[in-house]
Amino acid sequence: MHVGRWRSGWLRYGLVACAWLLSVGGHAVLAYCVRREQFYLLVGLWSILFVLYFVILRNALQLNLWVLTVGAVVLRLVYLKAVPALSDDYNRFLWDGHLWQLGINPYAHRPVDLMAQNRELPAPLPSLFAGLNSPLYYTVYPPLLQYVFRLSALTGPDIEQGIMVLRAVVVLAETGTLLCLPGLLRRLGLPASRTWWYGYNPLIITELTGNLHMEGLMIFAITIALCFLLLGRKPSAAVAWAAAVAVKLLPLMWLAFLPKRMRGYSILFGFAVVALVALSFLPFAEIVSAKNLGQSLDLYFRKFEFNAGIYGFVRWISTQLYGYHHIATTGPLLALLAAVLIGALAVTERHADMTRLPRMMLLSLTIYLLCSPVVHPWYLATLVALAPMAGVYFPLVWSAAVVVSYAAYRQQPYEEIGWLVALEYVLVGATMVADYVRSIKVSGKEPREPAAAAGEV
């Protein structure tokens, strides 16, 4: 029996090692050889990486956490010198950073207006302008990100060096998350091995480190905030929460779930978060800046649409019935519906305590994304980060299925394939139902041992 267990253990280690090595090769190909227009190649490689991901999750339970952390960081370092292949958002990041480095408020000007002034803008701004996907809009990136963008501009006009600085910041934030998650999961009474749901997820590695989306910084900050809340250190949690908001405004909606957990202290906590975020805007303290930021955020719900769930269904129905669809009306109405549903979720929640907070955060974010007119693949990163704390699997399935949204980039002008988007949401919906059925089956039972729970995936 002992020999059999020994052989079984080494077989698991061998499977993990092989899956990890193949993942390194797969991410290297994705980083340096694949472009988003190559849809079929992207889907094939993405599928292989997710198969390897699930092999690692099934067999890495008994491996040392430090070894797995190093392995997850190495996968991210594969992208170190790559230019983002699946997204061109980095051009705006570097544009904002170089503007501020020149003493120009990035919130105060649209790129197209600056170029129309025939100003002698130094390198690399003309090159970056050519790669912008939103030159007609004011920047929407909160102030803490502007500091990161300016840091990337300090390397000079070399775009690739600026990309490397941004990537180094993301990798450091991701490493911090991987180091904090095991302790956070233990305090929630969950197995630390669930860290690898996030750490080895191909979407997380590709979209955050590879394509330089800054959700990784927000996830790190909110992870720290949750750790402090569970430790009872509310002032420190408020600072971390404010940092998360100053990266992405999304965590503001999660303040709705604190009154039942903090009672009267929640008002002070919320005030501290808002005050700290306001302070972070001081270097850009112009009324026009706030107005421009709000205008760009409003356009998000009134003009843009991509890979949408409920919004996409409403658009299809409207088109079938009337022959057209009015996004300027549907987008804000669905945003209002999401706000009402999230508010109702917060008001009607029972047995509210800090250990259930990540689950409520995940549910509210799911509502928000399902009602949103735009669901880019990297928007799911926060769902994947919350999944191990909430014990649900649908974010993992969604992170795999969302690759079909890249079918829109096979040609220009970009055009979505409706049935592929529908298939994505059918798969996600089916997994949501399975999660719900499983939660009913385990409700009322004694909590499982962490080792047993860890073997679910």
Image: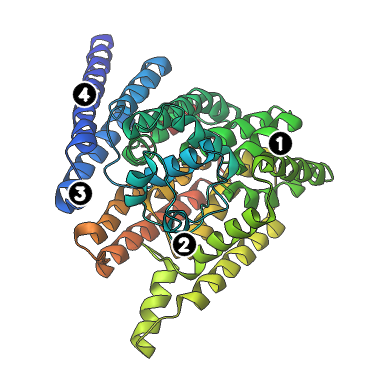
Q: How is the image coloured?
A: rainbow
Q: What amino acid type is highlighted by mark number 3?
A: Val
- Across and down, in percent, residue 425 comes to 35, 61
* Residue of label 1: 238
Distance from label 3 to label 4 (Cα)?
20 Å
Secondary structure under the numbered disc 2 in the rendered image: helix
State how far apart marks 3 and 1 are (Cα): 41 Å
Res 452 visible: no
Tell which circle, 2 or 1, labels the residue nearer the N-terminal end: 1
- Left or right of 262? Residue 444 is left
Q: Residue 164: x, y in percent? A: 36, 28
Residue in the image at 64% along x and 66% along y: 340
Mark 3–mark 1 CB contact (< 8 Å):
no
Q: Which residue is mark 3?
A: 43
Q: Amino acid at mark 4?
A: Leu
Whether tag 2 and tag 1 are in contact, CB under 8 A, the answer is no
Query: Residue at the spot x=35%, y=25% of the render?
Result: 72
Q: Tell me whether circle 1 and circle 4 mark residues in contact (CB < 8 Å).
A: no
Q: Which mark, by number, is residue 370?
A: 2
